[in-house]
Every structure is written in structure tokens, then in C-alpha cells.
Amino acid sequence: MQQRSLIRIVVALAIYLGITYLGGDIGRTIMYPIRLLVTFLHELGHALGAIFTGGEVLNLQVSEDGSGYTTTRGGIRSVVLMGGYLGSALLGNILLYLGVRQQNGAKYAMYILALAMLFSGLFWHNSMFTTGILLLFCAVLFFIAYKTNIYAEVLMFLGMACVIYIIQDFNIGPRSDLEKYAELFVFPPAQVWMYIWLVIAIVVTVFNLRAIFRKSA
């Protein structure tokens, strides 16, 4: 079991790296939906941070260029802000873990992710592109979970791609969140918080990989 899990992860990693660094324009086109998924998880992290701390979500935006934003009201602002980067890192690791270790859990996780996209697109509507792309994602994920037997591999790949993308993007992706976060905590500055968040994301990923292989042993 441990060797099988390792092989699956290595193959998924090789596919990701091959598409990203050797795929050229075709590779960038293939990875475009992954980029939008990472953005959605980032914004969903903000939304969940607001909801879990007593706030509410007004709207959620996923833009064509891969950027996004979430408008919230109430809640604990520091949790809402860090919920984007750290929340998406945690969600990506959960997808990776379930894809590798939990066959049935992977199917239900894909249903839940599809429903989260459906809910966000309809009830936190902010643009036709956001709603359209989230409904399309929802339909594709639901089809994969309901009609195919590759849902675990797909979920594992999505989780791995999200985690790698989030860690690679630490210097750009959460910049606006870091600037706002630094306003709440005058010291340390945003540059320091950036590395603190990066270390937390890496530690979460390391513990996740240890859990995957420890349970596989």
C-alpha cells in the first residue's frame, strides 16, 4: 500500500511538472482551470474564515486572469485575511490526502467541492464569468465522481497541483492580503508575514505527506 501510494504521487507529480514546464502554450492552457481552481479555493478560504468567525459573505469573484476577491462583512478580520492563503493550502492538502488514502472519501469530497462551487456561483454571485466557470466546474466534477472510476486520481492530482501552485505563488498570490494583514499587526511587516504563512503552508504539507505514508505503512 505504501509503495502504491508513493507511485501514484510520483506519477501525478511527474504529470504536473511535465505539463507545467515542458508543455509550453498547450501546457499553460491545460493548467488554466487548475489556476482558476486555486483561486476559488483561496477565495473560499476567505469566505469560510468569515463564516466560522460569525461574519457573512457578500460575494465571491474568480476573474479570467486568475485573480479574485471575496467581499465579507463581520467576523474576525485577521482570520478572514489569512483564510485565503492558509485556507487554500489546507483545502488543497485535504484533497490530496483523500485522493491518495480514501477511495470513498475522495468521491464524497468531489461531490462536496462541486456543491461548494454551485453554492458560491449562485448565492455569492458577482459576475457571469464567476458563476459560469463555477457551474462548469461543478458539472465536470459531479460527472467524474458519478460516472467514472478515476475520481480518486483526479482529486489527488487537483490537490497536489493546488498545494504546489500555492507554495510557488507565495510571493505574488497573497500580496494584497498580506498588506491588509500587516495593517492589523504593525509589527512584523508584510514581508515577514509572507514567510510565516509560507512556512505554515509547507509544515501542513509535510505533516500531510507523513500522515499519508504513516497510515499506508
Image (cartoon, rainbow, N blue to C red):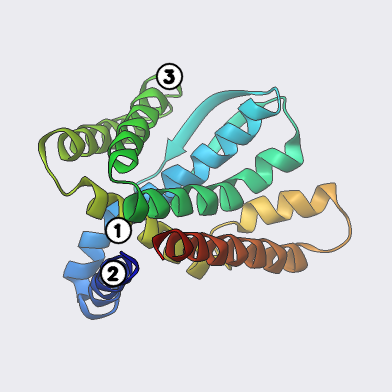
Q: Residue at x 30, y 74 (%)?
A: 10
Locate residue 26 relative to residue 83 in the image: left or right.
left
Say whether marks 3 and 1 touch (CB < 8 Å).
Answer: no
Residue ID for mark 2: 16
Residue ID for mark 1: 157
Numbered label attached to residue 132: none
Labels 1, 2: front one:
1
Labels 3, 1: front one:
1
Q: Position of residue 126 (x, y in %)?
A: 43, 28
Query: Which quadrant: the C terminus?
Result: bottom left
Q: Position of residue 97 (x, y in %)?
A: 41, 53
> N-terminal of the two: label 3 or label 1?
3
Q: Position of residue 91 (x, y in %)?
A: 48, 47
Q: Quadrant of residue 76?
A: top right
Say whether marks 1 and 2 touch (CB < 8 Å).
Answer: yes
Q: Amino acid at mark 3?
A: Phe
Is 31 drawn above or below residue 91 in the view shown? below
Q: Residue at x 28, y 69 (%)?
A: 16
Q: Quadrant of residue 158?
A: bottom left
- What SS does tag 1 mark? helix
Q: CA distance from mark 1 to mark 2?
A: 8 Å
> N-terminal of the two: label 2 or label 3?
2
Q: Quadrant of residue 215?
A: bottom left
Is 74 drawn above or below residue 149 in the view shown? above
- What SS does tag 3 mark? helix
Q: Name the residue nearer the viewer: 53 or 107.
A: 107
Q: Name the residue nearer the viewer: 76 or 160.
A: 160
Residue ID for mark 3: 123
Mark 1 nearby-residue class (10 Å; few <14, some 14–19, many ≥20)? many
